[in-house]
Amino acid sequence: METVRGGLHPHALGSATTGPANKSQLSPSTFWLMGIPGLEHLHVWIGIPFCSMYIVAVMGNVTILAVVRAERSLHEPMFIFLCMLSVTDLVLSTSTLPRMLCLFWMGDHDIAFDACLAQMFFIHSFTAMESGFFLAMAIDRYVAICDPLRHATVLTHSRIAQMGVAVALRGVGFFSPHPILLKQLPYCRTRIIAHTYCEFMAVVKLACVDTGATKRYSLTVAFGIGSCDCFFIAISYVLILRAVFRLPSREASLKALGTCGSHVCVIVVFYSTAGFTFLTHRFGHHVAPQIHILVANMYLLVPPFLNPIVYGVRTKKIRDNVLSTLRVKGRC
């Protein structure tokens, strides 16, 4: 579909030509994803690094899952949590990137209303799961470094499964109301979503009724989950660092610091971009929309891209297993 002068789409004209009768229309058939406002002429080029990151994310996370599944020595808490994180990354990136690339490269802006709600649910619930699995992995590292003798008895397979189920249920439970609430709202304004994907706050702005309570629920849940997870992750790594600096061997301290440092970098990228997006919704009315949307894309794209590199390539057991598999195939 082509835009009209000023970057508007014909769907946007509906609000100017229709009256109160539209308020009874609860479920519009489609929305129109704008992409990155002001950078439409660069969509094709922006799609290239996004596609590259997606390919690396898929290949890296699938490799981690295959290696851990095949190698029994890797059936340890750290690698089981890593597999949970990899599944989350695959769902999170696949629910956004293919559709985003269709927008960038093929100009496919229309998205069905139900597909939009489904994408929104996957994005928000699996982002919450990602945060929860970061916390679970921080707890695992804390027990492994600060109380190594009890690591196997504290984090048993049954307890790991319980933690994984709790993280998944939390994400689904808190964000299931999002599509239900939006399904019930009337949409009599423009159908244009000024974003590259169906993000809750971008969609709820299109409703023609007061959505203050709905917005407050979404922001409160997002802030509560993110801040609590971030707080306990920070506490875990502070305790880990205190234990690391007490290690008698300087070499062991540096090795532990290198591992924890790379983990912290990924966590900082995730929470800083997510925090920026949250604060922009709440206070950043003067932030340029293209900056806001690019950062919002980064917090969905960068962690799935970095996690296999930081937690996979930099983990000796996984790296050695991948290299040995490649050598065997090379000989064949």
Image: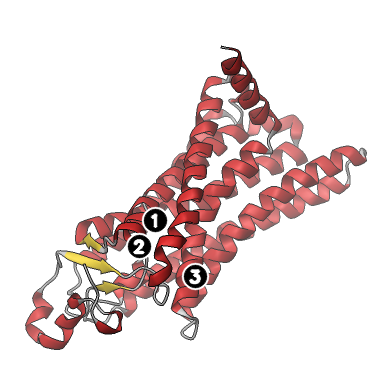
Residue at numbered disc 3: 277
- Residue 123 got which mark? 1
Q: Is residue 145 visible?
A: yes
- Mark 3 crowd level (few <14, some 14–19, many ≥20, 10 Å Cα): many
Residue type at mark 1 is Ile
Instruction: Kindly report which numbered mark, 2 or 3, lies closer to the viewer in this rendering.
Output: 2
First along the sequence among labels 1 and 2: 1
Tell me which label, 3 or 1, sits earlier in the chain: 1
Query: Which of 261 and 298 lies nearest the eye of the viewer?
Result: 298
Q: Mark 3 belongs to which amino acid?
A: Thr
- Amino acid found under the numbered disc labelled 2: Tyr
Where on the picture, by quarter, is residue 147? top right
Label 2: state its secondary structure. Answer: loop
Determine whether label 1 and label 2 are within 8 Å by CB: yes
- Label 3: state its secondary structure: helix
The residue drawn where x is 70% and y is 31% is 316
Question: Residue at image x 74%, y 50%?
Answer: 261
Image quarter hosting the C terminus? top right
Q: Is residue 288 above or below residue 108?
A: below
